[in-house]
Amino acid sequence: MLNQTPLWKYIMVLMVVAVCTLYASPNLYGEDYAVQISAAKDSTVDLNLVDRVNAQLEKAGIETKAVALENEQILIRLNDDSSQRLAREALESALGRDYIVAMNLAPDTPEWLDNLGGTPMKLGLDLRGGVHFLMEVDMQSVMTKSLKDMEGDFKTSLREERIRYRRVSIVNDVVQIQFRDQETLEKAEFFLKNRNADITIVEQGELTLVASMSETKLAEIRDYAVKQNITIMRNRVNQLGVAEPLIQRQGADRIVVQLPGIQDTARAKEILNATATLEFRMVDLDHDVRDAVNGRVPPGSELINDQQGVPQLLKQDIMLEGSHIIDANSGVDEYGMPKVSISLDSAGGSKMSLGTKGNIGKPMATVFIEYQATNEKNADGKIIFVPEREVVSVATIRAQLGSRFEITGLDSPKEARDLALLLRAGALIAPITIVEERTVGPSLGQENIDLGMQAIIWGFVLVLAFMLVYYKAFGVVANVALTANLVMIVGVMSMIPGATLTLPGMAGIVLTVGMAVDANVLIFERIREELRDSRSPQQAIHHGYDSAFSTILDANITTFIAALILFAVGTGPIKGFSITLMIGIVTSMFTAIILTRTIVNGVWGGKRLEKLWI
């Protein structure tokens, strides 16, 4: 008998639709006004802080819906935006700079649904509101740091090869190396040229080599600086709890940061501007730290305080920078003491191996450097940043280190976790400056949502009415499939972590509704043709679906390829449109072909029919 659907297919269709409906349902619950508290440097978020927060809110007379400790952050849900602002002000005043207090919007998803991984769709900046920053990387700092790296690398490698030099110094954006005799100069020139293919080394002046970076090397350094800053910026944005931030490159030295849902732009700017880096240096054991504290700092050394404010005398030569760190994880050693395991890239492994070879048994310090913006500007009109240094760890080198090593001697597991997080976050290559800031208010976002929803609803209603009038009973089947298609698009968008709904994305949904009904029109018209050719109703249904399938498949594949190209080469709104279009193509194929045929077979299949209402 024609048009029979096996039981397993019914079960599969029901499960797919049910799962998509389940994960689309969080979008019905809306969002709460919220205040989020996360730890700043040297602070801890725990249950004691929750008690402090509750006491402060009660003192200020602010009603809350819930206060919860989640993922080492405190999330306070409030009834309205005025309570949100009052809570932020009260908590900022009480907690000071030890904690980051930021306003946000939190999904009001039921706990049981949240435990299943159900979350609402992520809305883009044009729908949800938020803040847009255009940031510029300070390339002068990038070049200065690269020259210092080259200076330190020359000193280390020449000492390793036992080539004696008088002085290595930076002069006018080049590195000068001075020698005592011509023979040593020629030996050093041969060695350095073979070791540094991308650096130009020439003899200039009396017994002096001058090293400068090639244009290719300079371009590579600038490109790497922007890419590294983008990577680290994503880690910084996590402190704000933004569901789906957009962080991407614009031009040679600029970065675009969009934070949907963020209302506290001042706090966002504070976190994004907190430029930081890491350095590994040797502790100076040859001089007395007390003399340095009294003002007699030896040449080549520097006094830097640790987290407890105790001065540490360190050598100025940088053994390794945090940009070479690939991964860092906290744990315990064989004695049950806290440790941090670090993995470096190949260049960092080579530097660490050379730097530690002759320093076994000596202490090495990890220095955290944070750049703070001043009110002054340089000749180019850009903000001047001042570094603030702090020693976060001092550990003894037990053996020659390479690409993988461990830091021990830490006071507590928390210190190990904090240091691992700091190392894993990496180091911003250079300070960044916000050159443009735009705030999209929630009223504009809501207006865009309302207009987009009106377009979807009106388009959906008109299509439903047309199908019902024109195709009668089969039109009802098509309308069920269209409704399921819309639910499935929302469900899939909610399940995919990287999918964000934007205003162009709404246009993509409207387009896929039209494409889904177009597939049903092709099938139903083909069934009508088969009936006009005097085929039986069962044969007409069977041949109608089979004949239309190849046409529908070809049309959707070509559209999917076009959407995939848009996703690959496009940015921002174009990506939003292409994502919803690709998801819509897949769901419309499922609903227009598999779902409708399952329903049609269930209602009309396997029966003796004299006539079809189509």
Image (cartoon, rainbow, N blue to C red):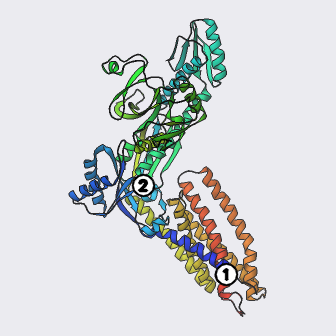
Depth order, front residue of 301/145:
301
Disc 1 element: helix
Q: How many marks?
A: 2
Determine which of the numbered discs, if any, sits on residue 309 in the image: none
Determine which of the numbered discs, if any, sits on residue 7 in the image: 1
Q: Which circle, 1 or 2, is nearer the viewer?
A: 2
Depth order, front residue of 110/307:
307
Q: Position of residue 301 (x, y in %)?
A: 42, 20
Quadrant of the drawing holding the C terminus: bottom right
Question: In terms of image quadrants, where is residue 389?
Answer: top left
Q: Judge whether 311 appears above or below 479 on screen.
A: above
Quadrant of the drawing holding the N terminus: bottom right
Question: In terms of image quadrants, where is residue 405?
Answer: top right
Q: Position of residue 483 (x, y in %)?
A: 55, 75
Q: Earlier in the sequence, mark 1 or mark 2?
A: 1
For disc 2, the marked residue is 71
Q: Judge whether 339 appears above or below 348 on screen.
A: below
Give amino acid for label 1: Leu
Give amino acid for label 2: Asn
Q: Is residue 61 left or right of residue 151?
A: left
Q: Is residue 484 left or right of residue 95?
A: right
Q: Judge whether 227 appears above or below 192 on screen.
A: below
Disc 2 element: loop
Q: Position of residue 128 (x, y in %)?
A: 43, 59
Q: Position of residue 364 (x, y in %)?
A: 46, 29
Measure the alpha-carbon separation of dots 1 and 2.
Answer: 44 Å
Depth order, front residue of 394/98:
394
